[in-house]
Image: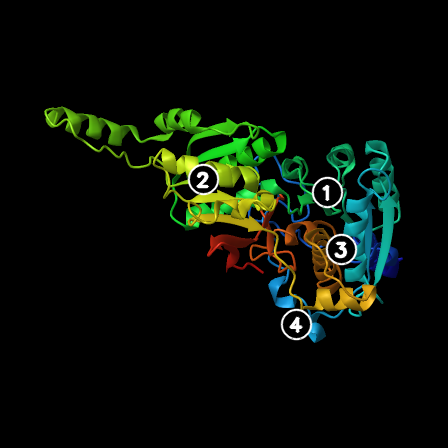
Amino acid sequence: MTPYRYATPCCRWRSLFFFLSILLLAGCQTTVVPPAAGPAPARPVVDAYGQPQGSPPTAVDVARTPPPIQTVPSAASAWPTYHWSQYGRKPVQIGVILPLHGRYARYGRTLLDGIRLAVDGPDWRPVVKLTVMDAADGGPAAVRAYEQLTRQGVDWVLGPLLKENVAAIIPHLREDLPVISLSKHSELAQQHPALFVHSIARGIQAAFMAREAMRAGMHRVAVISSLQPSARQEAEAFGKAFTALGGEVAGSLALDRRQVNYVNRLRTFRTVIDDDVVLRDLDLGLRVFAPLRQLDVRIPPGVDGFYMAMPGAMIAKLAGQLAYVDLRKVPMLGSNRWQDGHLLDDSGRYLGRARFCQPVQPDSAGPMVTQYRETWGGGQPDALFALGYDTAHIALLLGSRLGLHGQRAVQALHEQTGFPAESGRVRFDAQGVGEKEFDVFALKDRRLVLVRRHG
């Protein structure tokens, strides 16, 4: 009995040790990740706003989307074929939504031809899948096209073109699928963080000329337009862009192009735009020199320039009348609306300081024109064709060359240096609107001359 009595404590310690070991092993098994589950998730990387990268902006965000993430390579360093060995090519699926029949078919097919020419380049043909959807039947057709493209798993969507189609798909847009619309209604872009607008519309040209006015040292301008609704919209676009840059719009005037004599309207308008401080000083001077009856009073213009949203025939007619009310030396700015064939009717007498912009003419020796002539046998692509070509190239650059998808692609579109393009460099601002660059022309020796080229 004695051996049993001395062995009892040892057995008890062994039993306790064995029991604790079982508990410890059981506890360890609960933290083991099954092989099918993959590795444990890494700590999320946060952006400048403290939000996880790839998450939608919160209510405290001051911008439309978070700033570009730091891991996105510079788009400029990979355009168009530089660092090929570094980035290579990755498969990418691009969906297109355009009107291909009906009233706007001509515009839709021109844009589609440009997109197809870009995708058909030798660099991209093996890795790109292009799916084209017709949305000429209106908003419901555009929504069906977008939903079908998302089901097919496209990485990018180019289009739509028409305002009603863009507005229709906005409630259905995903935040991880970048959409580059080709609509002229740039204000739609601010309604969704994944929506961008790339256009050569006159409203975009007006915003460009507002930046040009600021670069030229203009701080106070007046705006004159025709009564045409599109001209009024262009004038408003210039005023909005100019004031956003810190400038001042002294006044605006709308004129009927059917009239001939605007002198009385211009005289009245001048009382609105003239500087009140200068007028008070002049009034004081007239009181001091009241005995002098023979005074040739010339009030300096109260503005640094005019923005003229009207056709060239109206510009040529108005220029001399502006000179008649002593506004002959004030610079005039405008868009390609001036290009109606009548701008030279003035013969350069009063338009020596006038400047207007128009879409960049593609380089005749560049890759796009060369490929165009090889495909169609000759001719010259127009600005709309080049716009489609450039839009596709942006998607190819980011989606295939840099391999960006989802939120990373959306954020990469905000690349601050912008994207070189045949139709003029473009940079997407915080609202998703493409700030386009255009060529600037002037009148010299009774002909139009290029004074500044933007590529």
Q: Position of residue 221 (x, y in %)?
A: 41, 37
Q: Callout 4: 10 Å neighbours few (<14), some, many (20+)?
A: few
Q: Of the residues under marks 2 and 3, which one precedes in the sequence?
A: 3
Against 295, residue 442 (above or below) is below
Q: Which residue is mark 3?
A: 40
The local secondary structure at tag 2 comes to: helix
Q: Cα distance, mark 2 to mark 3?
A: 72 Å
Q: In the rendered structure, which amino acid carries the disc numbered 3?
A: Ala
Give the residue number, with chain letter if any, for mark 2: 319
| Res 155 seen here | no
Mark 3 surroundings within 10 Å by alpha-carbon count, few (fewer than 14), some (14 through 19), many (20 or more) = few
Q: Is residue 442 left or right of residue 258?
A: left
Which of the two discs, 4 and 3, sits closer to the camera? 4
Judge the density around disc 2: few (<14), some (14-19), many (≥20) Cα neighbours within 10 Å: some
Q: Nearer the viewer, residue 252 or 74?
A: 252
**Looking at the rendering, in which quadrant would you find the C terminus?**
bottom right
Q: Is residue 281 left or right of residue 249?
A: left
| Residue behind mark 1 | 175
Identify the secondary structure beneath mark 3.
loop
Q: Position of residue 198 (x, y in %)?
A: 66, 47
Residue kind at label 4, given as amino acid type: Tyr
Badge nearest the viewer, 2 or 1: 2
| Residue under the point 39% across and 24% down | 268
The mark nearer the N terminus, 4 or 3, is 3
Q: Earlier in the sequence, mark 2 or mark 4?
A: 4
Secondary structure at numbered mark 4: loop
Q: Which mark is residue 82?
A: 4
